[in-house]
Amino acid sequence: MTRTELSQYLASFLQISNFKDYAPNGLQIEGKTEINTIVTGVTACQALIDAAIELNADAILVHHGFFWKSEPEIIVGMKQKRIKALLINDINLFGYHLPLDAHPVVGNNAQLASVLGITEPEVIENVAQGLMWQGRLAQPLTAQAFNELISAKLNRASQHLGDKDAMVGTVAWCTGGAQDYIDVAASMGLDAFISGEVSERTYHCAVEQGIQYYAAGHHATELYGIQALGEHLADKFGVKHHFVDVVNPV
């Protein structure tokens, strides 16, 4: 497929026009016209770019790309080295942030529910551009047992804040850095809330509102959407797909 065909398909499939985001969604660095091999990964770091070069990739698709609103506009240092490597090797870079979080099938939130075995997953309407979800555990677990399940499924130690003996049956989640949505989950009377990161204030929010909070890792909670997107493209268009996990403990 061509670069233009891929860009247009993903713009429609992920409905990028529906989102007000912190970075551009879509093609961020232009490379070769024909795309036969795609590499996917969570973040467009140097290690991912180097791996894509080794795999002779024509395009890289990531969740965390370049050109965030808060970052310096000048292209020097680390950013220059990354972009230079892409340009020299004629590799396209596509980034999809909130649209990839929200997609009902390949999105990070939908995929996390599947990995954790959460049943009846659904979007909580009118919250965070549809990025916050809720569902149920197939069988209620103690808060500690649920933390152990999360840690095992994501292959990373999850941090639990709350009462380890409390029972968890209903749960809300939002992947990445969404710890402050804990208050929404608490106001809905849900037993637990999962996100990727944690702040000092999160502990008090959990304890004082009687809700269990799980900081399961920003990277760990967002491993699955970009991988599912790559697999979808491989199945639909016959392109080669390689998912590269650059391990990140955060």
Image: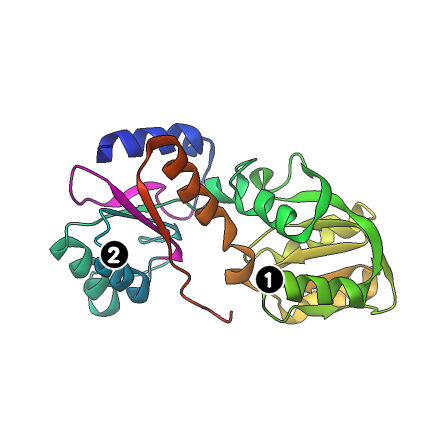
What residue do we see at 80% from left, 59% from top?
211
Question: Mark 1 sits on what residue?
Answer: 154
Question: Which element type, helix, strand or loop, lies under badge 2?
Answer: loop
Q: Amino acid at mark 1?
A: Leu
Residue 163 shows in the view: yes
What x and y, as percent, mark residue 126?
64, 35
Quadrant of the rendered image containing residue 244: bottom left
* Label 1 to label 2: alpha-carbon separation: 26 Å
What x and y, as percent, mark residue 40?
37, 51
Question: Which element type, helix, strand or loop, lies under badge 1?
Answer: helix
Estimate how packed mark 1 is, as few (under 14), some (14 to 19) or many (20 or more) residues with alpha carbons within 10 Å: some
Seen from the viewer's position, the closer of residues 241 and 13 is: 241
Let me know if residue 211 is in the magenta part.
Answer: no
- 196 above or below 28? below
What x and y, as percent, mark residue 106?
51, 40
Q: Quadrant of the N terminus?
A: top left
Q: Amino acid at mark 2?
A: Leu
What residue do we see at 47% from left, 31% from top?
18
What x and y, as percent, mark residue 230?
40, 43
Q: Reading the chain from its start, which is encountered first: label 1 or label 2?
A: 2
What residue do we see at 59% from left, 69% from top?
156
Estimate how packed mark 2 is, as few (under 14), some (14 to 19) or many (20 or more) residues with alpha carbons within 10 Å: some
- 211 above or below 239? below
Let me know if residue 34 is in the magenta part.
Answer: yes
Residue 215 shows in the view: no
Q: Residue furthest left?
A: 88
Seen from the viewer's position, the closer of residues 80 and 48 is: 48
Q: Bounds of the magenta span?
A: 22-43
Question: Mark 2 sits on what residue?
Answer: 55
Query: In the image, is 199 to the left or to the right of 147?
Result: left
Query: In the image, is 45 to the left or to the right of 21?
Result: left
